[in-house]
Image (spheres, rainbow, N blue to C red):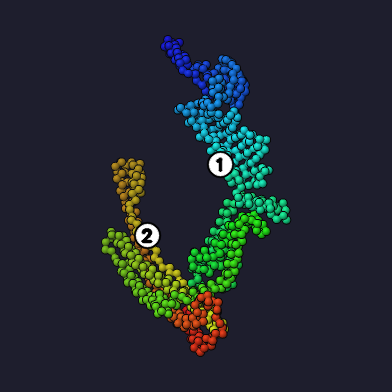
Amino acid sequence: MSKHLKILLLVIASISVVSSCGKEDKSEWYVTSDGVKLYMQDSLSTLFTKLQFEWIGGEKYGLADGRGTLVAVDKKGEKHYSKVLDARYGLTSPEAVRTVESPGSSAYYGSWKKGKPHGFGLKKEKSTIYIGNFKKGRGEGHVYVIQNGRLFYDGKWKNSRFKGAGKMYYPDGIMYVGNFKKNMYDGEGALYAEDSTLIYKGKWKNGQYDGLGTLNDSTNKYAGTHVWKNGDLPKNIKTVYDVLDDFDQKSTASERINYKARLLVWERYRELLITVGVVLVLALGIAVVTVNMRSYNLWPKRKEPYSLTQIYLYLILGGWFGLHRARLDVTSFWSLLKSQYPLFVMLFFFSLRNIVVCGINIGLWSQMPSWILINVLFWLLIAWLLVDIVWIRFRVYQLTGMYFRKTQDELDILEGKKTEIETFCETTGQRIEKKLQELPDLLEEANNIYSEKSSARLGSLKFEEEKLDKLIKVCSKAEDVVSSVRWYYDRMFAYLRDSRLAAYRNLYLAKELMAVARSVQGKKQELKTDIYHEMDIDITLDASVLEPITFNYGSMINTFSDTAQLFSSLGFKSGTSMAIGAGLAIAEAAISYVSARNEKKMEIVKNQAKVIDALKKISGDLSKIQAEILRSLEILASLYKCNKAFVNAYVPLRDEVFGDATFTNFIRGVRSDNPLFSSEEFIKDVNHLCVVCSEYNKINKAK
């Protein structure tokens, strides 16, 4: 060994001896070969010697505890020393043992990091000892908590609070096994008595029974499986159990057990049942609103009023939640509040528990809490339904007067106002004819553009593109004409459809009036319908023909490269090969370019011809449509004149026979023996109405 190496080893050994002598003895937790932890001073360990320990004696909580023998051996297995000592909670120093056992003292034995407990350690605070893991000064991991020399807690903790699975032991022998949160029972857990019998098993929250759990307590009349709240049963649930216990002595024990089983279902699934109930009543509400809005939109367009049979059927099928009212209220969404629906919803939710628990046992229902309220709601609903039997007749009578016997057009006619239909009939023919006069001019303009010839040969493609662009603009003007005619046609057809409906209704009302006055039945009316022709007029062009044409430089470069290589392989010089290749490539690209221009020119010319053909077709189609519109306008104008004549002939008679749709007139009704019906003037008016209706019917049937 060299001199320098010997000096270096001597220096290192000296530093080791000095450091081991000059510093305090290192204390830490050791784990023996048997897995027992103990805390001691390893003063004999040096840089070259690391001791291992064995404990032969008592242990508690995995720590050396009681009298035992501590044996220290080195890595080679040679015994360094063996001594008998008294350990307490893994502490081997007499001073540490005295500190732990003395009341009121505080200390910590374990690992540190940045001046805070970190890792495994034992912490003493007055009469409480914590043995477990720490992190940055706070308890985290597993811990044993010992109070007054007895094990109090064995389980998980976090931030120095019990959290997670654990066991808690009380001085009176009661034990809790389960989950913790914030030092309290929380989650699943079981509580045992001193003799290990089960007291309670189930859900906990904030240290109390909360949720589904089973209580085994013979002194508690509510013991058993329940859904608890804050350590007890809800008051309303207790009341129901009291009712079931005292229920009719004629009921058997098995029946009461069955009812209690249903009550447990209510306890466990109450929120789910309520949620399902909410979904059901919302679905019913949506159905009622949908029926109401549909009825609101269709009432003015109906051919005839509702029959009483139809509405009474709605009463039978959906009277509980007001489907018949949704059909007849026909006002708005808020009419839902005027139906039985809100009352039905209240009755349903107040009865939901009783439905689940009692089924159809009315005798048991009558003893349940809130029975009086349920009874009141039920009889209110029944009373309302009985009132509706009369209300339905009045409402149908009222709506017939509102939507059938009196309309806005009728009021305008009686006041001498010009209606929309009248204005439309007077102006539409002239406006359509004026619009259609634009088409010949557009067609002539298109033909002139199409027949133009170009004098320049190189600019012929650009010239044809400009021609097509002009023709497209002409097409745009033609499409504006088509859109205007289509608008008039759609509006005319809508008016015609409404006039047909008005004719049907008016003849229906005339039949109704004459049936009352003469006790005769008129012929059944049929609603005349017209055929709506879809105006499918369009011009389709290939827009790709207007895309620009460019040289195919990629192909030209490839041709140049291939040609140059070919001539080089044949023995031509490099410059000659490149010149020939460039010439052939340019020639090929030029030929392709010219060919593409010619093809594009042909496509443009074809599209120009398409434009001319389309414009001719539009002119022909619109001429046919114009004839149809004019014919329909004549029918519309005739129907409108008949409608005016009918209103003037019908309204005075209607007011005399029916009067306003008031409740008084509804109760009084129309007397068939009214002397008015046999008066000469009334008979003349009825005959005049018959003549008007006859002409009305002829016009309505005209094609």
Q: Position of residue 185 (x, y in %)?
A: 57, 39
Question: Can I make out residue 10 in this image?
Answer: yes
Q: Quadrant of residue 385?
A: bottom right
- Which one is in front, 668 or 500? 668
Q: Quadrant of residue 484?
A: bottom left
Q: Residue furthest left?
A: 455
Is residue 242 shown above or below 316?
Answer: above
Q: Residue furthest front?
A: 104
Residue 297 vs residue 539: left or right?
A: right
Which residue type carries mark 1? Asn
Q: Quadrant of residue 466?
A: bottom left
N-term-proximal mark, 1 vs 2: 1
Few, some or many residues within 10 Å of mark 2 (<14, 14–19, 20+): few
Helix, strand or loop under label 2: helix
Residue 375 vs residue 41: left or right?
A: right
Question: Can I make out residue 5 in this image?
Answer: no
* Residue at 70% across, 55% down: 248
Residue 206 — which label? 1
Few, some or many residues within 10 Å of mark 1 (<14, 14–19, 20+): some
Q: Which residue is mark 2?
A: 543
Q: Position of residue 148 (x, y in %)?
A: 58, 29
Of the two numbered discs 1 and 2 in the rendering, the one whose residue sits closer to the viewer? 1
- Which one is in front, 231 or 274? 231
Q: Position of residue 164 (x, y in %)?
A: 56, 37
Helix, strand or loop under label 1: loop
* Residue at 47% across, 16% down: 20
* Residue at 35% across, 41% down: 569
- Which one is in front, 474 or 211? 211
Residue 570 vs residue 509: left or right?
A: left
Is residue 141 shown above or below 690?
Answer: above
Q: Quadrant of the N terminus?
A: top left
